[in-house]
Image: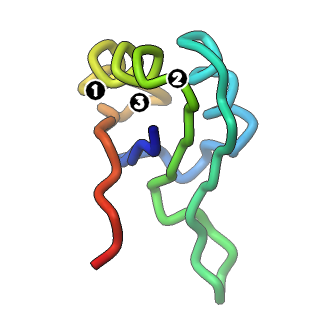
Amino acid sequence: MNMYIGNLSYNVKESDLRQVMEEYGTVESVKLIVDRDTRRSKGFAFVDMPESAEAQRAITELNGAEYVGRQMVVKEALPKN
């Protein structure tokens, strides 16, 4: 399942986010979205977890949870239009 992780601190790195998500199961990929000009984080990422049950548990437990001083938004990613 592909998940959207939003409202992240600009200081969060892909490796930090992977570590948090791996507490809930296998993480296939983590893609932190960065501004192409400044190379700074845009404050959101996409995480892919192959097991839907593990991903659903991560969504349930992490959505609204505080991480690095901000309340994360964690939900299933919607496909691009």
Distance from the alpha carbon under mark 1 to that under mark 3: 14 Å
Distance from the alpha carbon under mark 3 to that under mark 2: 28 Å
As drawn, 7 above or below 17: below
**What amino acid is labelled 2 in the image?**
Glu
Q: What SS does tag 1 mark? A: loop
Q: What SS does tag 2 mark? A: loop
- The numbered mark, 3 or 2, whose residue comes first in the sequence reads 2
**What amino acid is labelled 3 in the image?**
Gly
Taking the spot 46% from the left edge, 56% from the top edge, the residue there is 43
Is residue 17 or residue 75 the one in the foreground? Answer: 75
Taking the spot 32% from the left edge, 20% from the top edge, the residue there is 65
Taking the spot 36% from the left edge, 48% from the top edge, the residue there is 6
Residue of label 2: 51
Residue 63 tag number:
1
What is the quadrant of the N terminus in the image?
Answer: top left
Q: What SS does tag 3 mark? A: loop
Q: How many marks?
A: 3
Q: Is residue 25 left or right of residue 59?
A: right
- The numbered mark, 1 or 3, whose residue comes first in the sequence reads 1
Task: Assess disc 1: are there few (<14), some (14-19) or many (≥20) residues with their C-alpha within 10 Å of its C-alpha.
Answer: some
Image location (x, y in percent) of residue 50: 57, 31
Is residue 76 or residue 13 the one in the foreground? Answer: 76
**What amino acid is labelled 1 in the image?**
Asn
Q: Furthest residue to the bottom?
A: 37
Residue of label 3: 69
Image location (x, y in percent) of residue 19: 69, 23
What is the quadrant of the C terminus in the image?
Answer: bottom left
Image location (x, y in percent) of residue 75: 29, 38
